[in-house]
Amino acid sequence: MMSGIGQLIQLGGNVELVMKLGYPLYILTILGVWKVLGAIALVVPGFLRLKEWVHAGIFFVMTGAAVSHVFANDYGDYGFYVILPLFYAALNIASWALRPNNRKL
């Protein structure tokens, strides 16, 4: 949720990062809206199918971020810009796989 809000208001280094990767600035608005709506969908009770799609979306955003950094030759210190989004993708998979039975389709 917080990263989505940061992208919506173009806080911190979001603008520089997007420009460095070669994306247009409006991608911040698109990703920000998706992240905020996804976070809301995860905390609202019910809507199991929507939650499945949110988990898929998080996985796509995080792996897409890692691949974007690789293609832009922007690895960060010790590969941080690639490893961190892949770590978040792994946490997302774990969260989805370990959810209680009453939250599965």
Image (cartoon, rainbow, N blue to C red):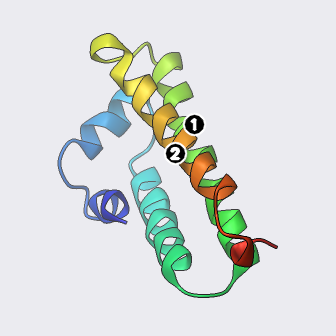
| Mark pair 1, 2: CA separation | 15 Å
Q: Is residue 27 left or right of residue 48?
A: left
The answer to whether 7 is drawn above or below residue 68 in the figure is below
Marking on residue 91: 2
In this view, the residue farthest toward the front is 101
Residue 41 position in % (x across, y down): 55, 78
* Residue at the farthest bottom position: 45
SS for dot 1: helix
- Does 44 sit above or below residue 35? below
Q: Mark 2 and mark 1 in contact (Cβ < 8 Å)? A: no
Quick one: SS at disc 2? helix
Sequence-earlier tag: 1 or 2: 1
Q: Residues within 10 Å of mark 1 (few under 14, many from 20)?
A: some
Residue at point 17%, 48% (across, down)? 12
| Residue at the image point whose x is 49% and y is 79% from the top | 43
Q: Residue at the left extreme?
A: 12
Front residue (pair 64, 15): 64
Specify the quadrant that holds the C terminus: bottom right
Along the viewing direction, whichever of 71 and 2 lies nearer the viewer? 2
- In the picture, residue 28 is in which quadrant? bottom left
Left of 47 or right of it: where is 45? left
Query: Which corner quadrant holds the N terminus?
Result: bottom left
Tally of numbered discs = 2
Query: Please, what is the three-letter code of the amino acid marked with disc 2?
Result: Leu
Q: Nearer the viewer, mark 1 or mark 2?
A: 2
Query: Which residue corresponds to mark 1?
Result: 64
Is 52 positioned to the left or the right of 73 in the image? right
At 74% from the left and 71% from the top, the residue drawn is 101
Q: Amino acid at mark 1?
A: Gly
Give how far across and how far down residue 6 sits, in percent.
27, 59
At 48% from the left edge and 78% from the top edge, which residue is drawn?
A: 40
